Image: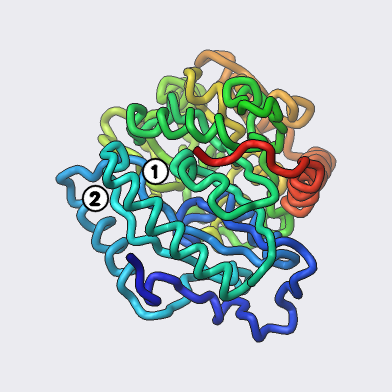
Amino acid sequence: MSGPDSITSAEAARGPQDPAAPTGAQPPVIVIADDWGRHVSTTQHLFRRIVRSHDVIWVNSFGHRRPQLTWYDFRRALSKVAKMVSARKAPPTDGEGPRLIINPRALPWHNIEWVRRWNRGVVLAEVQRALAAVAPGRTPIFVTATPLGADLVGAFGERAAVYLCLDDYDQLPGVERNLLVPYEARLLARVDATIATAESLTHSKRPASGRTLHLPQGVNYAHFATPREAPPELANLPRPIIGFAGGVGPVIDRGLLRAVRDRFPSASIVLVGMHQEEIDPAAWPEGTHFLGARSYDVLPAYVQAFDVGLVPYVHNAHTAAVDPLKVLEYLAAGIPVVSTGLREVQKYATVVEVADGGAAFADAVARALDARTPADRDARQAVAAKHTWEQRVQTFLGYIDDLPPRAITAV
């Protein structure tokens, strides 16, 4: 089913010959997640640190929706095919990557039974081969950050199987609910625990074992706290710069941005991030600056240049289960933060202005603009420093260590 090309070695990042590589004292970890290096996701933040102590076998995404006849999906499909058939080539890393990265020869039509069986067979064979190569005879841990890992739970004789739940797939825009929800139901019936980034998910995604654990988002503190020069494209914009860094799409309440613009007509509203929908500038406040996506390496320079960082999210079933990663990134950068009253933001209310409704949100921005003293900055950074990814990794690994041996097997 699969040839040697489908396993991509991360030798350039940290291969078996690297003296800093794990020695085998800890169990290897199989991770089913997003494409390594494509975006810096929560799962990748965690495992960029876990690879320091554990041999990690990472399985790249095999699709959360059926492809459509669009240019975006065509380019994405070409990229996937190229990875599947390419020679052994390390993806982009910052020097800390998994031992092996698998680009599975899987198909995206997961609701078709024969495709489901094919995909399971392909991934199973490739991971078993990877285990034999990097961790022969050692009992692994299985972690999936996607419901599509459901059919692999128990297949590797793992000591523990965990669902790392980052979103409510019942509500997440851009995925096919009818495709993923049945997989998630099977997954919850089989895993030993759900580890979720939002408190609400520990209730809605409870597995048959009954074990749900909360792991809030963390922050790469030094990355965002280390001072950077303002990017040239922001240096000459009228102040204040009221900014947002994240996916630009339906999650943003444009009415709140209009209220801010009305209150501060000379301000620059700046949106930094990938466009999740086609952008019609006429539907946004006049003078909004759409900068598009910026690499994670340079993102702190943009955030630090904001006078206020916004989390202007709508309230809906999706955002009720979201712990916005950007809140801690803003705080680490030391800038004032204004957010709508999302449940997961409330835990930072001592250093975040929380408000709902246009007038109240604009008032909160005004207060934030007045809170830019060195003492205010220090207070925000002190909070962020308590929530680093290193601390989250210790909690995550502690949760895994505390799980009893597997009692739920694959069906």
Tell me how the rendering is colored: rainbow
Q: Where residue 6 appears, x then y in whole percent?
A: 39, 70
Secondary structure under tag 2 reads: helix
Q: Please, is residue 53 above or below residue 42 in the view?
A: below
| In front: label 2 or label 1 | 2
Image point (67%, 68%), residue name: 137
Q: Relative to the observer, which residue lies in front, 390 or 53?
A: 53
**Is residue 230 in view from this perspective?**
yes
* Residue 350 lies in quadrant: top right
Q: Given the image, on which type of amino acid does mark 2 rest?
A: Asp
Q: Which mark is residue 315?
A: none
Q: Relative to the observer, which residue lies in front, 262 or 146?
A: 146
Q: CA distance from mark 2 to mark 1?
A: 27 Å
- Please say if the residues under marks 2 and 1 sit with CB atoms less than 8 Å apart: no
Is residue 135 shown left or right of residue 124?
right
Q: Which residue is mark 1?
A: 289
Counting other residues with Cα less than 10 Å from the Cα at mark 1, is it few (<14), some (14-19), or many (20 or more)? some
Counting other residues with Cα less than 10 Å from the Cα at mark 2, is it few (<14), some (14-19), or many (20 or more)? few
Image point (73%, 39%), residue name: 372
Secondary structure under tag 1 reads: strand
**Is residue 251 in view from this perspective?**
no
Image point (62%, 77%), residue name: 14
Q: Which residue is mark 2?
A: 73
Q: Where residue 225 appears, x then y in whole percent?
A: 72, 55
Image point (47%, 34%), residue name: 266
Q: Where residue 79 appears, x then y in whole percent?
A: 30, 63
Q: Given the image, on which type of amino acid does mark 1 rest?
A: His
Q: Relative to the observer, which residue lies in front, 148 or 255?
A: 148
